[in-house]
Image: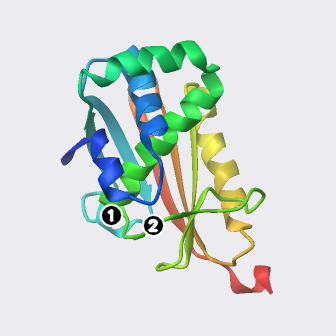
Amino acid sequence: MQTVRQTIERLEGWYPSLFVEPHVVAAVAVLSEYSDSPASFVVHGENVPQLAEVGGAMRLDLSWPRSAEAKAERLRATMQRSPLVELAATAVALVVARRFLDLGRLEVTSYGDRADFRSPRRRAVLEVSGTELADEFLRRHREKVAQAAANPYGWDAYVIVCLFSARGHRIRLSHHECLEESHE
């Protein structure tokens, strides 16, 4: 399986219009509880050409600086687990979007728009979610696909769901074309 290596602190340079530091620290907070840096994810893709070229899956080794662990420990002491995992998933998803998709500049959507981000250049939305429960990973992905497909823009949807687990981290990345008649 092909491996992509990435440092999470690159996010700030990739998305200069977004304040991603809390997301990066949350990712370190969650990931450092499972392993030292780098953390390995198996990335499974559906309808994503870059992943289809390599058999539908790749490994992502995501590293972070040891200096980030002090902030991560403080953030774990400050936040409840569920929002921490969602912030961590957003950071990981932004890395995945940058490495495997060509979405360009992302904008945060409005509350209720059924997706987290939109890419005006690609006319697509990006919905992100994360979990630490392997039993809900695939179900969560299906739910997020249905949610993002109903976006009010009538745009294609990308869905990225992250599983953080001692048995191995996983990412499910999928692309779904908009059905025009459902948004007329």
Can the viewer see residue 162 in this picture? no
**Residue at coordinates 26% horizontally, 18% vertically from top-left?**
36
How packed is label 1: few (under 14 Cα within 10 Å), some, or many (20 or more)?
Answer: some
Q: Quadrant of residue 70?
A: top left
**Residue at coordinates 38% horizontally, 58% vertically from top-left?**
16
Q: Is residue 163 above or below residue 52?
A: above
**Residue at coordinates 30% horizontally, 54% vertically from top-left?**
13
Q: Which amino acid does label 2 sit on?
A: Asn
**On the rendered structure, is 118 left or right of 64?**
right
**On the rendered structure, is 82 left or right of 35?**
right
Q: Which amino acid does label 1 sit on?
A: Ala
Residue 5 percent coordinates (x, y) = 20, 43
Q: Do the residues labelled 2 and 1 touch (CB within 8 Å)?
A: yes
* Tag of residue 4: none
Q: Tag 1's secondary structure?
A: helix
The residue carrying mark 1 is 52
Give the quadrant of the C terminus.
bottom right
Can the viewer see residue 173 in this picture? yes
Give the camera-side residue of 140 and 1. Answer: 140
Q: Is residue 167 above or below residue 117?
A: above
* Tag of residue 47: 2
How packed is label 2: few (under 14 Cα within 10 Å), some, or many (20 or more)?
Answer: some
Q: Quadrant of residue 139?
A: top right
Q: In this view, does 101 lie above or below 58?
A: below
